[in-house]
């Protein structure tokens, strides 16, 4: 059970990571995107993204997009600029709802409404 909530927390962290990404520079002639606050991917993050995809929280935006990293000093690499291809994702409405915990807030509202109705009926009697 302990590992279960940690795993769910990691999945939501990956979802937040997708939500935080933004395009800093778009080079129209070569169709290259420079993405700020890009999600750092490893095998665990890929599994988290697959879970988000399965739940309908994200959807593919661009598949097989050439991807590379800056040097630790924040500069362009001296060798090849791209060293892998990745699929980039966007959040769906369900993903935004999951981030904002809309279902929980709706449930709290319903519970408050039922409690108010019950209190009104008991006090009126």
Image (cartoon, helix red, strand yellow):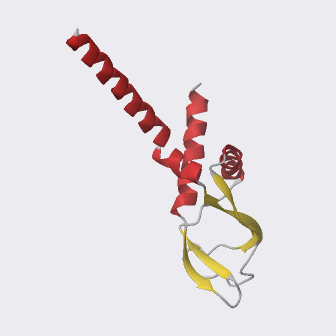
Q: Between residue 94 and residue 46, name the one nearer to us.
A: 94
117 is higher (above) or lower (below) than 75: above
On the rendered image, what quadrant is the N terminus found in? top right
- Residue 66 horizontal/vertical position (percent): 74, 74
On the rendered image, what quadrant is the C terminus found in? top left
Q: Between residue 116 and residue 91, name the one nearer to us.
A: 116
18 is higher (above) or lower (below) than 47: below
The image quarter containing residue 80 is: bottom right
80 is higher (above) or lower (below) than 55: below
- Residue 35 horizontal/vertical position (percent): 58, 73
- Residue 17 horizontal/vertical position (percent): 55, 57
Q: Between residue 2 and residue 26, name the one nearer to us.
A: 26
120 is higher (above) or lower (below) than 70: above
Task: Say whether residue 107 is left or right of residue 15.
Answer: left
Name the residue at 39% across, 26% down: 111
**Total numbered labels placed on residues in the image:** 0
Name the residue at 31% across, 16% down: 118
Name the residue at 55% across, 46% down: 12
Q: Between residue 21 and residue 106, name the one nearer to us.
A: 106
Farthest residue, direction front: 125
- Residue 114 horizontal/vertical position (percent): 37, 23
Farthest residue, direction top: 125
């Amino acid at each position: 059970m302990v590992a279960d909530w940690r795993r769910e927390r990691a999945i939501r962290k990956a979802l937040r990571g997708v939500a935080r990404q933004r395009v800093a520079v778009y080079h129209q002639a070569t169709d290259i995107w420079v993405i700020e606050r890009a999600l750092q991917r490893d095998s665990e993050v890929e599994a988290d993204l697959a879970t988000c995809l399965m739940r309908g929280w994200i959807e593919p935006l661009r598949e097989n997009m050439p991807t590379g990293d800056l040097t630790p000093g924040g500069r362009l690499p001296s060798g090849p600029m791209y060293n892998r291809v990745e699929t980039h994702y966007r959040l769906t409405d369900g993903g935004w709802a999951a981030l904002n915990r809309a279902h929980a807030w709706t449930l709290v509202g319903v519970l408050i409404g039922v409690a108010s109705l019950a209190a009104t009926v008991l006090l009126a009697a």
